[in-house]
Image (cartoon, rainbow, N blue to C red):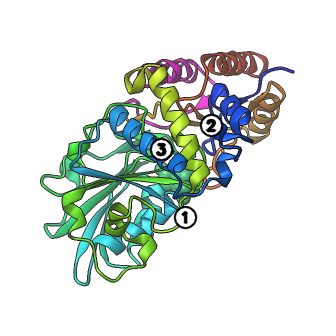
Amino acid sequence: MQEVFNFSAGPATLPKPILENIQQEFLNYNNTGLSVVELSHRSKEFFAIRNSAESLLRELIGISDDYAVLFMHGGASSQFSMLPLNFLSKGQSADYVCTGYWSTKAYAEAKKFADINAINALENGDSYSIRPTVAWELSSNASYVHYCDNETINGIAFAELPDVKSKPLACDMTSSILMRQIDVSRYGLIYAGAQKNLGIAGLCIVIVKKELLNKVNKSIPRLYDYKRCAEESSLVNTPPTFAIYVLRLLLDWVKSEGGVDQMYRRSKENSEWVYQVLDNSQLYNNKVVKEFRSNINISFDIQDKDLQNKFLDQAESHKLLGLRGHNSVGGVRISLYNAMPQAGVQRLVEFMQDFEICNVV
Ligand code: PMP
């Protein structure tokens, strides 16, 4: 059978060796006679998995001891509520920078809990771009500034870290974590759902400055409390053990492949390949201004919707899956996470070029 390539935005493709590794040790983890999914979350075997996931993450991203690493439930969306619940008490507010679907969702959720200042930073006319930070009306009393590093649906990314003066930055890095070097010390809090670059759904990683934990509100649900979660090593209740195990395997893989720098080089190369096809095309329309193009999620459309459906159908028959754009915008979306092999990008690029030759007269 021809190899299948999965370009889905998430749950996303995983490296083959990891899937094989999981399969191989699934029934008997490390000679315990138990499957990894049967291990107690308080067993020494699980502790070893959890601790090595944390130390690998610290090493690969460069997270100092000034930050706690939390393993939480509920995906990235649950952080949309946890963040304001933890850090905004009565009368406090925060700035939310809206550049697309997910940052606007985060804003809408936070608004349920506090008086939130929305900053519309998306320039959305014939093309998409992010307004410069000098044009943002930041409020003087914001407890933090929230933004989304890479908008997964439209493929809009920040070219550099926004300058918000002395305010703590809270960042949704769900689709971009582990794909380029970041300076963690510039952030108050970073969160990322795991199902793209950190393994499988069910886990969300939170990296939070320990200093901020003293500001956490007192009366919030136990499971949402960052401070408690840090104090109890993310064992406030049963954590998503299998997802943490897969994370550990994935981080091992990233390290063995050369770490974040290597992931960045590949992602840049792969995305440039695709953008070259888009830039030389009469058929495919990508609206994002070059400076804000995502290396990770590339969205475009074909004006003739019948032809677009034909493109998606033919892509599937070439075993190029997961290319249909998000329901909210339609179109086509190519997701190039760390585990996408070069052979997948090559087949996709060749398919796109052939499709255009056959369908543009
Ligand atoms: N933020 C971003 C940037 C995302 O891409 C997604 C999911 N695609 C989410 C948040 C929501 O993630 P979850 O489904 O894990 O809640």
Front position among marks 1 and 2 = 2
Farthest residue to the front: give it. Answer: 32
Q: Upstream in the sequence, badge 1 or badge 3?
A: 3
Magenta highlight range: 263-290
Checking the image for residue 101, the label placed there is none
The amino acid marked with disc number 2 is Asn
Q: Nearer the viewer, mark 1 or mark 3?
A: 3
Mark-to-mark CA distance, 1 and 3: 16 Å
For the point 40% across and 69% down, the residue is 82
Q: Is residue 349 above or below residue 51?
A: above
x%, y% of residue 25?
Answer: 69, 35
Mark 3, other Cα within 10 Å: few <14 / some 14–19 / many ≥20: few
Residue located at (26% from left, 42% from top): 184
Q: Toward the viewer: 193 or 223?
A: 223
Residue denoted by label 3? 48
Residue 30: assigned label: 2
Residue at which label 1 appears: 238
Front residue of 132 and 337: 337
